[in-house]
Image: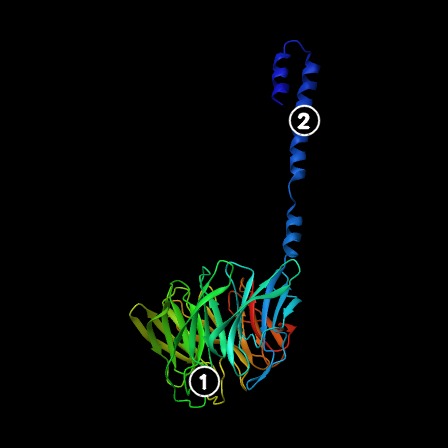
Amino acid sequence: MIILFRNEVLLTHSLSTDKLTLMKNLTYSFFLFMFLFILACQPKEKNMDQTNSTKKHLAFLGTYTKKEGHVDGHGMGVGIYTTDVDHKNWELKNSFAEVVNPSFICHSPNHKIIYAVNEGSGGASTIKVLVYDLADYNIKEIQSVSSLGNGSCYVSTDREGKFLWAANYGSGNVIQYTINKDGTLTGGMSQQHEGTGPNKGRQEGPHAHFIHEHPLRSEVYAVDLGADKVYRYLPTASGLQLNDSLSVTPGGGCRHLAWHPEGDHVYILNELTGTVELWEWHGSVKERQQIISLPVEGEERYPGSAAINITADGQYLYTSLRGPLNEVVVLKTDPKTYQMEHIQRVAVGSAPRFMDLTPDEDILTVALQDDDYILLFERDEETGMLGDNPEKIDVASPVCVVYQ
C-alpha cells in the first residue's frame, strides 16, 4: 500500500490527468476492499449468542437411598445432571449408587470432585470422595474415610480448598480433614460438643447439624440443634480450636445459619420453634437483636424449619417449613438495622428439606424430600418474590443440590 502511494507521487508530473485519476480510484478501491474483508472476518454477535444459549451447566444431587425413621429413602445416591444456561431443563447424565444416604454433598474448589456424606443406616458414617469425568459423566469413588461419628449430615470446604469439615448429627461432633493436592482427605480430627436442651425428645444430647466457613473471615461456625448452641472455631493445622459460642433461645433447636454479606450479622434458623434469630457477632461483640417467627401467628403445629439462604446483596432471606406446614417463607431485611420482615409465603409439597439459589440467583431450588421432585422457582431480583408455576424435576428422595 505504501509503494502504491509513493508511485503515485513520483508519477504525478509524468502522467496525464486521466491516468492520475485512474490510479487514485484503484488505490481507493484497494483500501475499501481490505476494510470489507477484515469486517467480514469478524465473529458475528448472533453466532456468539447462539454459543452462549447452548452452554450447559452442571447440577449435582444427593438423595436418600434407604428407608430411615424420618424418610422413606429410595433415591439414586449421587446424581450428575446437565442444565441449560438458565439452570432449567435438567437432564440426568449419570449416578453413583455405592453410597448410603448422601444427604449432603459439596464440590471441591480445586478439583472435579464431589464430597458426599455417607450417612449410613444405624452405624458409623463415612465421607466419600467422588471424582467425575466431563467426557462421559462417569462418577467413581477414589476414597472413603471415617467421619469419626455417626449420622453425618453436612459437609463443606474452605474457599481455598485446604480443609474439609463435616457435622455428625447422631454423635454430636464436628470433624476437620486436610485436603491433599489430589483432592483426597487425611488427618480427620474431632471436636465433641456437649449439652442438652429442654425438648427431651430431640435435645437429649448434642446434635451437630451444620459447619461452614465465615464468608469473609477464616472462622468456622458449627450449629448444634441438641445443645442450642452455635460454636465459633479457628481452623489450624492441628484441628479446630474453639474460639467462642452463643446460645439461642432454649428449645429453639438451631439447625443452620446464614451470614449477611457484610459479615458482622448472622441469621440463625431454629428448627424446633420455627424462628430466625438475628445476632450481631464479631470479635467480642455478641448481641441478639431480633427473633422472628416463620409460621403464621397462632400456629402451634411443629414447624420443622430446615433451610435458610440469603442473597448476595443481603436483602432477602429464603427459609423453609416442613412437617404439616410445608411452606417457603421469604423475608426482607432492613439495610440499616438488618432486621427482618415477612413479604411472602409459598405453599410447596412435602418436606422442603433443602433450598439454595442458583449462582446467578435467578432461581430458588427447593428439594422436596418426601414428594420425589425438585421445584425451580423463578425469583424477581428487585422484589425478592418467587414466581408462580415453578419447573418440576422428578427425582426420588432429593435432599441436596450443588451447582457448578
C-alpha separation, residue under disc 2 versus residue under disc 1? 80 Å
Q: Position of residue 93 (x, y in %)?
A: 66, 65
Quarter of the figure with residue 334: bottom left
Residue toward you, 92 or 269:
92
Residue 261 visible to an observer of this rendering: yes
Name the amino acid, label 2. Answer: Phe
Left or right? Give the position of 265 relative to 359. Answer: left
Q: Position of residue 17 (x, y in %)?
A: 68, 13
Q: Are marks 2 and 1 in contact (CB under 8 Å)?
A: no
Residue 272: mark in rendering:
1
Question: Residue beneath label 2, please?
Answer: 30
Q: Residues within 10 Å of mark 2 (few under 14, many from 20)?
A: few
Residue toward you, 90 or 232:
232
Mark 1: secondary structure: loop
Whichever of callouts 2 and 1 sits on the residue coming sooner in the sequence is 2
Q: Residues within 10 Å of mark 1 (few under 14, many from 20)?
A: many
